[in-house]
Amino acid sequence: MRLLDPNAKNPKSPRRSSSLAIMEGILARKTFFYGKLPSQPLRLTVLKLDGSSFHIQVSKTATVAELKDAVEAVFSHVPHKGPAKISWVHVWGQFCLCYDGQKLVTEKDYLRNYGIKDGDQVCNFLRFIQQSASSKPFDYHT
């Protein structure tokens, strides 16, 4: 025998218990997994050639390209035109970032593959010259 809800729009629909409705509401929502919760970012220090430094944050799953984007973002206040303009194409063509003697030049590489962890002073700017495509990809000068 089914119980019918007299207040329902369709009198033929069965009445649902409140605990069942609560359970359905919970299951209808996205399920949360602890592994998918946002993780704390990596806080890194970038040492510049003049000895000064600045701090950046990137995700724990960041790539070298994302690290470079974070570095560029620090200088977003600099004018985009005129003599003070920073040409990032020129910067990354002349300098690279490094960590523990490893040059970070492959943009798709994950930072974790280099052993970079939260709190590290990882990224010293190193001077290098990018050669033409017909010769070796990079000739590094430190």
Image (cartoon, helix red, strand yellow):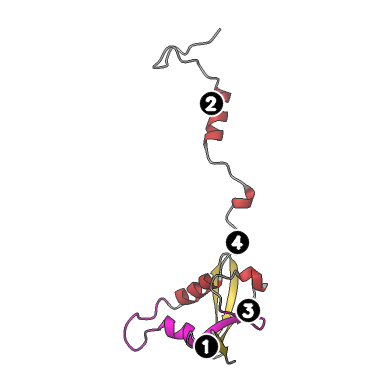
Crowd class of label 4 (few under 14; some 14 to 19; many from 20; radius 10 Å)? few
Q: At label 4, which amino acid type do we have?
A: Gln
Q: Earlier in the sequence, mark 3 or mark 2?
A: 2
Q: Amino acid at mark 3?
A: Gln
Above or below, 91 against 24 in this view is below
State yes or no: residue 101 in magenta.
Answer: yes
| Quadrant of the frame with the N terminus | top right
Left-right relation of 73 to 105? left
Give the structural element (helix, strand or loop) at label 1: loop
For mark 3, does the 10 Å Cα neighbourhood hold few (<14), some (14 to 19), or many (20 or more) residues? some
Q: Are marks 1 and 3 in contact (CB under 8 Å)?
A: no
- The residue pinned by badge 3 equals 121
The residue that disc 2 covers is 21
Q: For the residues marked 2 and 4, what is the alpha-carbon distance in whole angstroms?
A: 35 Å
Q: Disc 1 vs disc 3: which is toward the camera? A: 1
Residue 40 tag number = 4
The numbered mark at residue 135 is 1
Q: Which residues are magenta?
A: 76-105
Q: Is residue 26 left or right of residue 77?
A: right
